[in-house]
Every structure is written in C-alpha cells, then in structure tokens.
Amino acid sequence: MLLADWIAVAVLAVALLLGLIAGFAGGLKFFTGGIFGIIISIIVCYFLYGVVSDWAFVNDLLVKLSGSVASGGNAFTDFLVNIHFEAVLLCIIMFVVVQILRIIIVKIIAGVLEINNTALKVINKLLGMVLMVAVAFMVGLIAFQIIYWVGGESAQQVSDAFNGSVLKLDWLYENNPLRSMVHYFSLA
C-alpha cells in the first residue's frame, strides 16, 4: 500500500469515529447550520429556480409585476426592469422559504434521532458514520478537482503519487465525477 492509501485509511477512520461520536443528528445540525446552511440554501435555490419560475401562476405573477413597474416610466422603475427585479424578488422569496423548510426539516430529523431509544441511538450513530464518510469523500473529491485545476507539475506529482494505489485513488483522481459535473454546469 502507498502512503496515499494509508492516509485515506486514516481519514476514513477519523470520519467513522467523528460520525460515531456526533451521530447523524449532531452532524446534520453542524453541516446545515451557520454558513453551511446558507450555502446549502443557495445551492437548492439555484437548482429550483428554473422549476419554480416555469410554474404558470408564478410566471404570470412575475410578468404582471414587471409590467406594472415598467408602467412607472421613471429612471428608478426603468432600472428595476433592466435588472429583472422580479427574478431577484423570486430568488429572495425562495431563499427565505428554503431556509425555513431547512430549519424545520433538520429540527424534525434531529429530534426524532435524539429520542432516548436504543434502536434510534444505534441508527443515529450508524447514519452519523455514513454522513461523515460521505463528507470526507466529498472533501477529497473537491481537493482532487482543485489539484487538477492547478495542473502542471503539481498535478503530475499527485497523479504519480497515486499510481498503483490499492484503494484505486489513481482511478478516482483521473475519473473525478466533479470534473464532468463542473463541465456540464459550465455549458449550461
């Protein structure tokens, strides 16, 4: 096994231990609170905007709102129409709704999993371990993607260090799923 394999095993062990200690409820509270929660809400709004804006009643409402503001005929209303304030307003409303729903859903899930019941405690700990391993895996993929973007000699050294990995880190580095996702969203 390569040094990179041993590092990956150590990261996996730490993630499993953190998941066991924090549980799913604790991990969920941590990763959906504060700045992480805001980032998650922004990402959810980004993916939902196209769906919500295509709903007929929302689209009609946005067109009517834009038309009524455009009829103002002064510099300020012209500015609002030019920046598509109706789309900005929809995004703000969606963000507030997603934030409220995120808080409610996390409180319900955490409340259920923190019930003083042996079966739920075991489920909470197991799901916590899965969550922490998933987070560690995602952080690793993001690090691989950043190294790939940096390119040059650094990327080649990392690729060489992973070559022959028992855990197939070389394959994961070369076939990072984030690479195709980033490419897909850059074309959209």
Image (cartoon, helix red, strand yellow):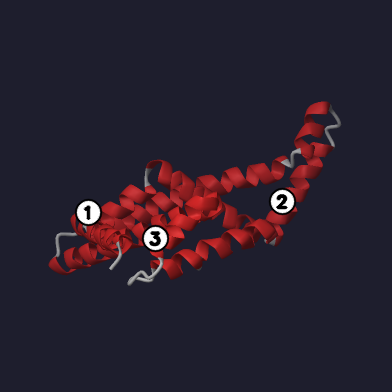
- Quadrant for residue 159, please give it: bottom left
Residue 7: percent from left, percent from top: 28, 58
Residue 116: percent from left, percent from top: 14, 60
Q: Is residue 161 visible?
A: yes
The residue closer to the viewer here, 136 or 21, is 136
Which secondary structure, mark 2?
A: helix
- Residue of label 1: 22
Q: Mark 1 and mark 2: span between their CA atoms?
A: 45 Å
- In the picture, measured across the screen, residue 174 lies left or right of residue 25, that is right
Which secondary structure, mark 3?
A: helix
Give the tally of numbered discs: 3
In the image, what residue type sits under mark 1? Answer: Ala
- Residue of label 2: 61
The residue closer to the viewer here, 115 or 123, is 123
- Residue of label 3: 161
Which secondary structure, mark 1?
A: helix
Q: Which mark is residue 168?
A: none
Q: Mark 3 and mark 2: span between their CA atoms?
A: 57 Å
- In the picture, measured across the screen, residue 99 lies left or right of residue 106, that is right
Residue 136: percent from left, percent from top: 34, 57
Question: Counting residues from the N terminus, which is met first, the one under dot 1 or under dot 2?
Answer: 1
Residue at image location 49% in from the left, 57% down from the top: 156
Q: Quadrant of the N terminus?
A: bottom left
Label 2 neighbourhood size at 10 Å, few (<14), some (14-19), many (20+)? some
Residue at image location 85% in from the left, 37% down from the top: 71
Label 1 neighbourhood size at 10 Å, few (<14), some (14-19), many (20+)? some
In the image, what residue type sits under mark 3? Answer: Ala
The residue closer to the viewer here, 4 or 94, is 4
